[in-house]
Image (spheres, grey):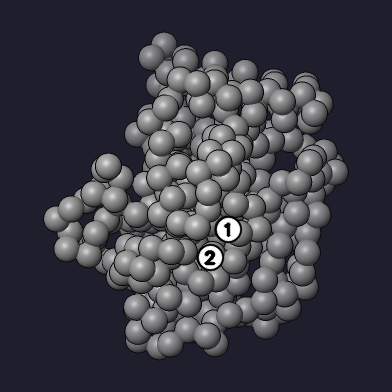
Amino acid sequence: MSKFQAPTFKFALLHPKYWPVWFFVGLLALTVLLLPYSLLLRLGRGLGYVVIKLAKSRVAIVQRNLELAFPDMTATERKNLSEENIKNTGLAIIEMGIAWFWPTWRFKKHLIVNNVEEVLALDQQGKGVLVVAVHALNLEITARAFALFAPGYGVYRQHSNPAYNFIQHWGRTHHGNKMVDRKDVKGMLRVLRNGGRLWYLPDQDYGFEHAVFVPFFAVEEAATTSGTSVLVDASKCAVITASSFRQNDTYTLEIDPDISRQFPRRDPEGAARVMNSALEQVILRGLDQWMWLHRRFKTMPDNKNKGIRYKK
C-alpha cells in the first residue's frame, strides 16, 4: 500500500506540547483496565449527560437528523431517542479504550458473534470481502471483534496531531488489523483482489464530489458515496454488512450474508440504493447507537444550499 506509511514512535512525540494527549490516553487506559464494566458504563453515559447539558447545538443536530429520517416519529420519541444517543456518544470514549486496551480474555466475556461461518467460508474460497460497517458509536469494538477470527484492512485517515495519530494507529492495529490510506483506491482493490477483507463505511455524507443522491431513510435525495460501485465492479468481491450493538453489558456482532449479487454492475446510483437499503437495516438494530450527531443530510443535489436542511 504505497501511499500509506504506518506512524512510528519518535522521541519528538514526547515533547511537552503532546503531554495532554499522552495524559488523556494513559488515564483512559488505566480507567478501562481497573474499573469493572458496570462502572465504565455509568461513567461513559455520564459523560454523555454532560454533553446534553452543555452542547445544545449537538443535541439539536441529532434531533434534526431524526426529524428528517423519521418524520412520523413524535417529538417526545425524538427527544428521548436523541438524549439516549448522546449518552451513548459519551460511552463511545470508554468503548474505544475497551477496544484498544482490554486483554482478549476480558473482551471475549462481553462479546457474542453470530454467523462467523459466513466470513470463514469466504476466506476458504479465497474471495475478497468488502466488510460494510456503519458509524456505530462502538465501531472500535466491532473492528476489535473481527480481529479475533478474521482481521482485515481498515481505511485510515491520519490525525493531525502526531502523538494521537501514533496512538490511534497502534490501537487499531496491534490486535491484528491493518490499515490502508483512504485515498489509496488501488491499494483497496489490491486487498480485495488478493482475497483480503476491507472495512468500508459508506453511511455518512462525504460531500458533493463523487456522490450520488439516493434515498436514505425518509430523505429521498441523500448524498451517498459512489465508491461502492467502483470497489464491487472492479474487484468482484463479496459484500457483507457487520455491526456490533450493545445490550446491557454484551456486544453482539452480527454478520450478514453476502449481498454482492444484488448490486447492479456499472451503475453507481443503483449500487448506492442497494447499499443504503442494507445500511438502514443495520442501523435499525441499534438506532440509539448510531452517530446521529453527524450532519448526514447537509449536502444537496445542486451543491448550492449546503446545510439548508439544518436551518429553520
What residue is pinned by disc 2? 279
Residues at badges 2 and 1 in contact (C-beta under 8 Å)? yes
Q: Which residue is rendered at x = 53% and y = 56% of the image?
A: 134
Q: Quadrant of residue 122?
A: bottom right
Q: Can residue 289 be seen in this snapshot?
A: no
Distance from label 2 to label 1 (Cα)?
A: 6 Å
Residue drawn at (58%, 80%) of the image: 259
Question: Could you say which quadrant of the image residue 33 lies in?
Answer: top right
Looking at the image, is 160 positioned above or below residue 212? above
Residue marked by disc 1? 283
Instruction: Please tell me whether mark 2 sits on a helix, a strand or a loop.
Output: helix
Q: Is residue 144 left or right of residue 137?
A: right
**Quarter of the C terminus within the rendering:** top left
Disc 1 is placed on an element classified as: helix
Q: Nearer the viewer, residue 215 or 98?
A: 215
Q: Is residue 253 visible?
A: yes
Horizontal side of residue 59 vs 45, given as left or right: left
Q: Which residue is located at x 81 percent, y 54 percent?
A: 112
Q: Quadrant of the N terminus?
A: bottom left
- Which of these two is toward me, 248 or 201? 248
Which residue appears farthest toward the left when viewing the image? 304
Depth check: give the residue in front, 287 or 157: 287
Q: Is residue 196 found left or right of 275 in the rendered image? A: right
Tell me the residue at 67%/76% (across/down). 257
